[in-house]
Amino acid sequence: MSKNRARLLLVTTLLLAASLACQTITQAFTVETDRLTPAASPTSVGGQSGNDGPVNTPLAEEASPDNPQPGAAGFGDPYYPNFGNGGYDALHYIIVLDAEIGPNTITAEVTMQAAALEDLTSLNLDFVGLEVDRVAVDGVEAQYKRSGGELTIYLPAPLSAGEAISVSVAYHGTPGRGVDLSSRPEYEIGWGHYGEGVYIAGEPGGASSWYPVNEHPSDKATYEYHITVDDPNVVGANGLLQETIPAGDGETTYVWASVHPMGSYLTTLAIGEFDLETSQSPEGVLIRNYFEESIAQSSRNEFDVTGEMLDYFASLFGPYPFEAYGVAVHDTPLGFALETQTLSVFGSWFINEEVIAHELAHMWFGDSVTLATWQDIWLNEGFATYASWLWYEHAYGDGIMDDIVNDYYDVMASFPHQPPADPGADNLFSDTVYTRGALALHALRLEVGEDSFFDILYTYHETYKYGNASTADFMAVAQAVSGQDLGDFFQAWLYETELPDIPQLGLSADDF
Ligand code: ARG
Ligand code: ZN
């Protein structure tokens, strides 16, 4: 690409950054209150009130085999205390789902295999909308209650810590949007039906719009899908297609499975009339792209660079962590793309080299190493943004990195913003998270030097791959690998509102 074209892209991204910045300042925050304040627990034990502390604080009485307790209705996320649930660890979900695309109705049965973390009398799943037909625990029909986004299941017999449990929920209806987390409608989407197709974009709270789930990214699990649709629709999903089974009546069941654990916001289905295009990266990683039939060839061509990018990122961050990569490109305008695991979601907008690099980089940072809480969102977005800059540096020459950093420093210096490691619950996708997060990584590179910096990125992924990491975990890796005391550096870049200087580039917020 010519320098001009690179410039053009940079300008486009700056415009995008500027508009994000505006939204950061003006957006109002609306929430579905039942998700942000703890639902009353069925037996009302313990003093769980308000949302000013973890919802899963120890109950007044210790759970024990003689005194089993209800599991908490929230995981205790600092931003969204009621997301997820306490008391158990989800291990595997089996999603059996029949979708009618025209009327947009589904009939499903979802089984969650889990392990109890404490002695339990009941447990909660997160589930919004739809109609529950039957709940069973280890094959025995169970009583349940719904309240807002919580599905409380009363266990037919108390469960002891460490025991395995299998919970099945049969349900039907028309899936809606997920939890309302923002005035920005594009962030409220779970099951996205657009006439001829369905996409799923569940970050942060949309998975519960289509299946009952422990909806917190810290409880990663493996998944298997058995999705039945009318021909000639096809189904793409996370992982690898295992089997297609004729289901009679002009229907086909697509069986997909993901080997590696996944956060619930990273689950996706692509349903519609799609072309499957399969290739490999130069180093041999499988790429399978699903393009809706009406997606233009020129848009498809944008993704040709994926294999080269993937191998480049693998050379920096460590081997590609999953069994395959690809994109599902839906012919509907989406205001974002989403890094759903092994199969990123794109709409007919936002198809460009920067976003393609960004979503791909999330496979290491976000999907393999998943944020520990939503407050750690910069570990996803700052890293993916910086990775896209690294791609530009690799593809278009060293000089471009300084230009990018200068321009974005200018943007961030031009308006007051929250620090990236505590942007606020209403600012998950704001500019400080993406851009200042990325600037912080570049500043770290200049602070510790090339070798240490890339060693830090590699070691961080290697240490936490397939699991979760917090900002503290990343800072500890950076200190250990570099051997430097980076306390003041991280404090300034990640936790203070004032934009720090980048002395090596002569950048100071005072100059703007
Ligand atoms: N994580 C996405 C990205 O890579 C942003 C998604 C924002 N939209 C949403 N519906 N959650 O930038
Ligand atoms: Zn991102």
Image: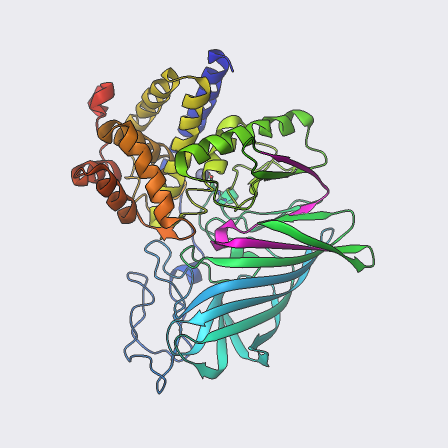
For residue 409, say whether it is visible: yes
Q: Quadrant of residue 59?
A: bottom left
As drawn, 397 above or below 444: above
Helix, strand or loop: magenta stretch: strand
Residue 444 placement, left or right of 2:
left
Q: Position of residue 29 (x, y in %)?
A: 40, 47
The residue positioned 48% from the left and 64% from the top of the image is 91
Q: Position of residue 283 (x, y in %)?
A: 54, 33
Of 189 and 57, which appears nearest the observer?
Answer: 57
What is the span of residues highlighted in magenta in the rendered image?
253-280
Residue that sits furthest to the bottom in the current view: 66
Is 264 one of the magenta-colored residues? yes
The residue positioned 52% from the left and 45% from the top of the image is 340
Residue 387 placement, left or right of 507:
right
For residue 22, say whether it is visible: no
Which corner quadrant holds the C terminus?
top left
As drawn, 102 above or below 365: below
